[in-house]
Amino acid sequence: MTELCVTNLSVVRDGASLVSNASFQLQPGELIVALGPNGAGKTSLLRAALALERRSNGTATIDGHDTSQLSPMARAESIAYLPQIRPLAWPNLVRDVVALGRFSHGAALGRLQATDRDAVEKALAACDLEHLADRRTDTLSGGEIARVHCARAFAAGAPLLVADEPVAALDPRHQFRIMELIADYVAGGGGALVVLHDISLAARYASRILWMKEGRIVADGSPADTLTAGRLESVYGVRARVSGLSVEIDGAA
């Protein structure tokens, strides 16, 4: 079983501590949400765990292999990554963008093997993009583009997914749609670590929440165990009422 294991990871950049002694594990069957205010270190934690940003201390391994020692292709075979900023350099067809997810398997556009084509078609279907497969991406809405990026990640067939704010700038309907896709991916045997800013979405979908503040993981547990009014005040500085997994923000503390 593929597992991402992060132990005492720290990131220091230009003398500033961005992440301090963070530890967590991600494995198939889990949908972990990282929550915290802007500047809490969530993106740096994800990038350093995947060896996309230099870490100053600690370890990050995939099945015991240090992520910094793996080739980009080997990392991509284990973990599909959706970064916070996902520009499309040119207006490709939707099908071709989704096919980029197969590059970790040695595929190339126009030269897909049968297994690659099958993976692309399954990802298009899973993300309800079959009717848009031959559309140019510059003709799509923001919600449709978000589904294209998810399909690209799913096409890789990686056992783990790391997604940095996959629902940013989407309306509520499309936010739920993307989170449902990720939840289905986990239900199908994958494991996902997702950065969100919406506490209610986290409460609805997460099996675990990593609460971050000032570069540290200050709590790690289920929504039922960690989502409290006191936690929201200490992490976000807001007054809130929590009833079960329902959250109502009253204002700044």
Image (cartoon, rainbow, N blue to C red):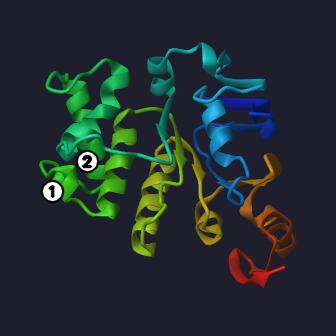
Earlier-in-chain disc, 1 versus 2: 2
Q: Which amino acid, by three-letter code, is at mark 2?
A: Leu
Q: In this figure, which residue is indicated by the disc labeled 1? A: 131
Q: Report x, y in % for residue 146.
A: 37, 55
Q: Furthest-front residue in view? A: 14
Packing grade of label 2 (10 A; few <14, some 14-19, many >=20) is many
Q: What residue is at 68 percent from the left and 58 percent from the top?
A: 38
The C terminus - image quarter: bottom right
Looking at the image, residue 60 sits to the left or right of residue 29; the answer is right
Q: Name the image quarter holding residue 121.
A: top left
Nearest to the observer: residue 248 or residue 239? 239
Looking at the image, residue 59 sits to the left or right of residue 190; the answer is right
Q: What residue is at 87 percent from the left and 72 percent from the top?
A: 230
Check residue 177 in the rendering and tell me which mark sits there, or answer none: none
Q: Report x, y in % for residue 205.
A: 58, 62
Q: Is residue 161 above or below residue 65?
A: below
Q: Report x, y in % for residue 136.
A: 16, 50
Check residue 124 in the rendering and tell me which mark sits there, or answer none: 2
Nearest to the observer: residue 253 or residue 145? 253
The N terminus - image quarter: top right
Looking at the image, residue 191 sits to the left or right of residue 180; the answer is right
Q: Report x, y in % for residue 122.
A: 27, 43
Q: Is residue 86 above or below residue 117?
A: below
Looking at the image, residue 9 sits to the left or right of residue 187; the answer is right
Q: What residue is at 62 percent from the left and 30 percent from the top?
A: 53
Circle 2 — which element? helix
Circle 1 — which element? helix
